[in-house]
Amino acid sequence: MLVGVPKEIKDNEYRVGMTPAAVAELVHHGHRAIVEKGAGVGSGSLDEEYQRAGAELVDTPAEVFARAEMVVKVKEPLVEERKLLRPGQILFTYLHLAPDLPQTQDLIASGAVCIAYETVTDAHGHLPLLTPMSEVAGRLGPQVGAHALEKAQGGRGVLLGGVPGVAAANVVILGGGVSGTHAATIAVGMGAAVTVVDRSHEALRRLSAQFGSALRTVYSTRASIAELVSEADLVIGAVLLPGAAAPKLITRPMLATMRPGAVIVDIAIDQGGCCETSKPTTHSDPTYVVDGVVHYCVANMPGAVARTSTFALNHATLPFTLALADKGWRAALKEDPHLRAGLNVCEGKLTCAPVAEAHGLNSVSAESTL
């Protein structure tokens, strides 16, 4: 199979779909790779490394999309990239379709076979291709939140860990899954007063066992969230419903109860965000203020630490990339129900029920397309 790796074009996105080591594995399996020049520079992988790995370098994304049987990316294809897709071509990347109707419509119209990292599952019901980026985003949450809390950034002027004689910041984390747990790890390590909110008793018990008295756990209700948010210096939204739009846990009226200069870091923004006032931002313009509350809603947070993120992502995606190349998409999806769960759009049909529900569209089962 001829596999193509274009350079990412989203604002300040420096990750790349395949590292030179991943390309070398692909070539070892008897396949070919074409890589757009400069695609890996932002994550520290030079063109010469791709050539040594056996890839052919090309000048433009148009050539990658025109020739490749499978395109491996990181972020969802933007409008100009979606125009380059063709019927039967495999697109393997993050898609996050639930909050993005135009992309959903374009991918359906393209006739391509679109497999989303974020809905591929494993035998334990986890999301193995979303997990590494959830870990990165979770660990970045307190870091970017601490920066946004600085007065010069529009925040309250509060140091996350405080100092002797001055209280630490109150950090509330909505969601005790992968992102929430990693956010808690960093926030606790920075010395903040941390509370994690979740409606899974199993998650709350796990967090209590892991952190002990270093953090509080609270069962999630509208009332408990409203009370905690009103007292928070930093709120980190880390809720996830696989494939679906994120629930709006922070309402507009709640902002009026928050302290001026408090910060919301909405890690869930890829799936529409968990705050009613959240809207996607970029690394070049990451924050905005609503009712005195600073919102950080960068839709590709892990892109800020592109080298760490790229290698973590490639370690997770490579086995699936090889399966698709070795067997072809139809056979690979027939054999592996977990990879099949990643199929969101297939040759003009929507195959992800949560996305269909979010947009009021019809969907078919992935099995029916095989």
Image: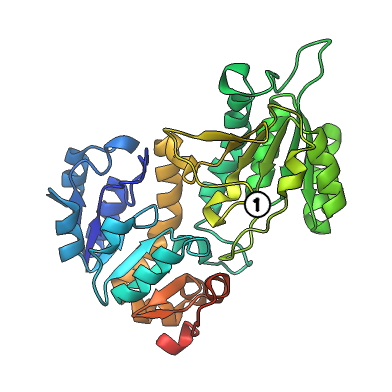
Residue at the image point whose x is 78% and y is 21% from the top: 168
Q: Give the image location of residue 205, x and y in percent.
A: 83, 51
Instruction: Give the amino acid at mark 1.
Output: Cys
The residue to which callout 1 is attached is: 274
**Viewport quadrant of the N terminus:** bottom left
Q: Quadrant of residue 158?
A: top right
Q: Is residue 353 above or below residue 278?
A: below
Residue at the image point whose x is 44% and y is 61% from the top: 95
Q: Residues within 10 Å of mark 1 (few under 14, many from 20)?
A: many
Secondary structure at numbered mark 1 = loop
Query: Image check: 319 left or right of 246?
Result: left
Query: Image check: 292 left or right of 116?
Result: right
Query: Image check: 254 left or right of 109?
Result: right
| Colour convention of the picture | rainbow
* Residue 279 vs residue 162, the one in the foreground: 279
Q: Is residue 189 above or below residue 184?
A: above
Residue at the far top in the pictured view: 165
Can the viewer see residue 29?
A: yes
**Viewport quadrant of the C terminus:** bottom left
Q: Is residue 331 above or below residue 289?
A: below
Q: Give the image location of residue 153, x and y in percent.
A: 57, 22
Residue at the image point whose x is 41% and y is 64% from the top: 102
Q: Give the image location of residue 350, x and y in percent.
A: 44, 78
* Residue 115 vs residue 80, the one in the foreground: 80
Residue at the image point whose x is 65% and y is 38% from the top: 264
Label count reads 1
Q: Give the image location of residue 133, x and y in percent.
A: 51, 48
Q: Quadrant of residue 214?
A: top right
Can the viewer see residue 211?
A: no
Q: Is residue 177 above or below residue 161?
A: below
* Residue 252 vs residue 357, the one in the foreground: 252
